[in-house]
Image: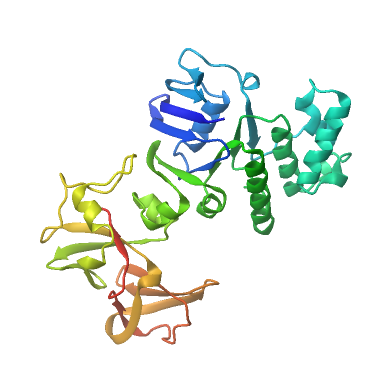
Amino acid sequence: MTIAFRGISHKFGNQTALSNVDLEVEDGEIVCILGPSGSGKSTLLRIAAGLEPVQQGAIFLGDQLLADVQTNPPPERRPIGLVFQDHVLFPHQTVAENIAFGLHNQSKALRDAMVKQQLASVDLADMAQRYPHTLSGGQQQRVALIRALATEPEVMLLDEPFASVDTPLRRKLREQARLTLKATGTATLMVTHDPEEAMDMADRILVLVDGVAVQLGTPEALWRSPKAAFVAQTIAGLQPLQGQVCGENIQTAFGAIPINRITNREDFLNGAGGGVKSTLQDSRTAELVEGANVTLGIRPHTLGLKPTNGPAVISDRRFLGQRYLTLVTLENEQIRVETAEHEALAIGTLVEINFASAEALIYS
């Protein structure tokens, strides 16, 4: 069932945690909430779960009101499954008993069948009689997930569910969780601080910065057209670079970038938003006029290097797996250049950045 947040704002004392957030999660859709620490991610989840009251706005399940300022049913009266980072399994109960906990209205035969089915779905069929402390972190996470799913909730809330799991297992668990949630058709809202995890899990990503929704869209849309600096740097992998408009170029410390290489220059001049607050300037406050100072975001893999007499110098080189990284330094500034092939230029070589094929976005 669809869960919809309408105009959700929340404060802790004088500190604003959320500011007029709107979001709708459809049946079978997984939406990840991404943002820096203190951005309001977990607060939105806690409001949905009933662990925090609605101070302003409303939450709907389908066309029915779930909670608002006057209506605040407790967590146990909401058709919502919860999985948190620490799993919160009952230590005195077996795995099977943990999963069956929310199925008390079913006959024993039906409970046993459902528990067996859920365990088999996450490759834990032989763990039914084990206790939580005998399981690995990844196994406990899977038990917590299927325990929540066993009650067939209309909405699933996941708060950093894989944060305590080692990286190789985390990838496997993400894949299992996504397939399980998709198979059940459950509307899912998941909090994460990890952009890779959001890209891997989500159908859409909501980015919160200081309690404000700065962008909402598919992982591809956020990667290709980030509307805020946080999105550009964490999801699209862009690096910031200061510059000044000079004729048909933007002059930076590392050289001139042709304005026709700015992929969002039309959005910049005509206004951009995409339905959420954007940190891109609009035509009322910014123009690409001569002498204007701007902040760019550059895709490192679209840059090139050529040896010259300086003044920039190669200060470091690294292998990243799919690409090679060259770090170029000029006084107190640095720029990353990523290439598919090993760069023959040695550390200490004086170089010039080639911006002829650069992909860049402009922010202010």
Q: Which quadrant of the structure image shows residue 141?
A: top right
Q: Which quadrant of the figure contains the N terminus?
A: top right
Image coordinates for residue 133, horizontal then vertical, percent: 81, 41
Q: Is 47 left, or right, of 297 in this rendering?
A: right
Give the residue displayed 56% in from the left and 23% down from the top: 50
Above or below, comparing residue 180 to residue 237 in the picture: above
Q: How many marks?
A: 0
Report the residue at 64% width, 37% height from top.
84
Residue 316 occupies quadrant: bottom left
List x then y, in percent, for residue 23: 44, 34
Q: Where does the image place residue 135, in percent across and percent down from the top left?
A: 81, 46
In this figure, which colouring scheme has been used for the structure?
A: rainbow
Choose between 252 and 33: the one closer to the eye: 33
Q: Position of residue 113 (x, y in %)?
A: 85, 34
As drawn, is 224 to the left or to the right of 29? Answer: left
- Is residue 291 visible in the rendered image? The answer is yes
Left or right: where 360 falls relative to 338 = left
335 to the left or right of 203? left
**Outermost residue toward the top?**
70
For the point 81% across and 39% down, which residue is it? 117
Location of residue 8 (image quadrant): top left
**Residue 93 visible (yes or no):** no
